[in-house]
Image: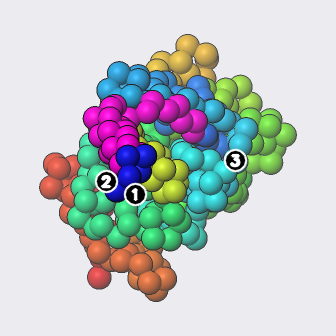
Amino acid sequence: MNKTLNGTVSAAVLLSAMMASAPAMADTFTLRIGSGHPNGPSVYVTDTANFFVPEVVRRVAEETEHEIEFVEGYGGAIAGVAETLEAVQNGILDIGAYCICFEPAKLFLHNFPYYAPFGPTDSEQAMKVVRQVYDEVPWLTETFESEYGQVLLGLHGWDNYHLGTTNAWETVADLEGVKIGGAGPNLPWLEFAGAIPVQSTLPDGYMSLQTGVYDGWLMFPSAYLGFKFYEPSPNYTLIGFGAMPVNALTMNMRSLERLPEDVQAIIAEVGAAYEAQAGASLNAAQQRGLDGLVAAGANVKTLSDEARAGWAESLVSFPNQQAKDADGRGMPGSEVMSAFLAAVEADGYTWPVAYSID
């Protein structure tokens, strides 16, 4: 080998050795994150903006050679409430936070907490048992990846559902013929009362109540206060349909895979922490909402135990009905609903009616 070639080879070997021993080049990665609901009155979005985002930024900066910058778009700035799953799938958003309730076809079975109303009213308990079902039935998690090209980072939810109305009412019979808005999967709860269900979204609620598009909302206190629904609809009846862990924080798989492994690990860990704090966050928001409604002058009352029991009895077949519907769609409906009912009971909660899955 001549001297020139030998020198070139030696230099290449030395350079390779130096590169192998040097730290990885620091990079700044920009991620788009968003939700159709706004930051503030929607607890899961507030926790996305105030917990998930800053915690990822902090940990990546402190624990790796890299940095993460977020472009945040809440309140539909990038994708609406019924568009976020698809926005993450298509890469318009790298990370999306959304209510599964607005995907009644694609995520029909993931709405399973809605299919067994009058369940746990404590959000920490509700989050615990729903996570247990996800762990017992991997299909729920795998569907996000196999069908929609995204990874489930963490679950979140809505606090305990009640009913707000424009006009005061005394008995369930008074609700017959009253138009009431809801997210979709919870609208069948209204059949017993003879109310007229209307599909709607939180951003549309205030104007729709004000103009009489409907005269009530199935809604949890945190949002009823946050969206000021008590102004056009001041009567709020505590019914206790249950807390609903039906919100997801997901990330586009391609966006995740282009990140260094240590950054990927941090995002996964912060996603799990986001879910772990959700129950306590929702419980606190529920109490703030109730206190705020009273302070704002809303007419807050509690439905009698007898009326609540009758309402629950009217829906005794609903879980089984939805399980069979999911089975017919090629989804493990009976398995998921059975696991959910069992998990709730095993955690010490007593259903007001004897739900069962055939």
Front in this rendered view, residue 105 or 61:
61
Front in this rendered view, residue 295 or 273:
273
- Is 312 situated above or below 16? below
Q: Residues within 10 Å of mark 3 (few under 14, many from 20)?
A: many
- Is 304 situated above or below 118? above
Q: Which numbered tag is attached to residue 79?
A: 3
Residue reaching furthest to the top: 295
CA gap between label 3 and label 1 equals 25 Å
Residue reaching furthest to the front: 2
The magenta region covers: 6-31
CA gap between label 1 and label 2 equals 8 Å
- State the residue at coordinates (32%, 26%): 63
- State the residue at coordinates (69%, 47%): 79
The residue wearing badge 2 is 130
- In the rendered image, residue 131, in percent from the top left (x then y), is placed at 29, 52
The reply to whether the C-beta atoms of the residues labelled 1 and 2 are less than 8 Å apart is: yes
Amino acid on which disc 2 is placed: Val
The reply to whether the C-beta atoms of the residues labelled 2 and 3 are less than 8 Å apart is: no
The residue wearing badge 1 is 113
- State the residue at coordinates (58%, 36%): 30
Q: Earlier in the sequence, mark 1 or mark 2?
A: 1
Q: Helix or strand or loop: what does disc 1 sit on? A: helix
Front in this rendered view, residue 74 or 315:
74
Q: Residues within 10 Å of mark 2 (few under 14, many from 20)?
A: many
Examine the rendering and report whether any part of residue 175 can be seen: no
232 with respect to 279 (left or right): right
Q: Which numbered tag is attached to residue 240?
A: none
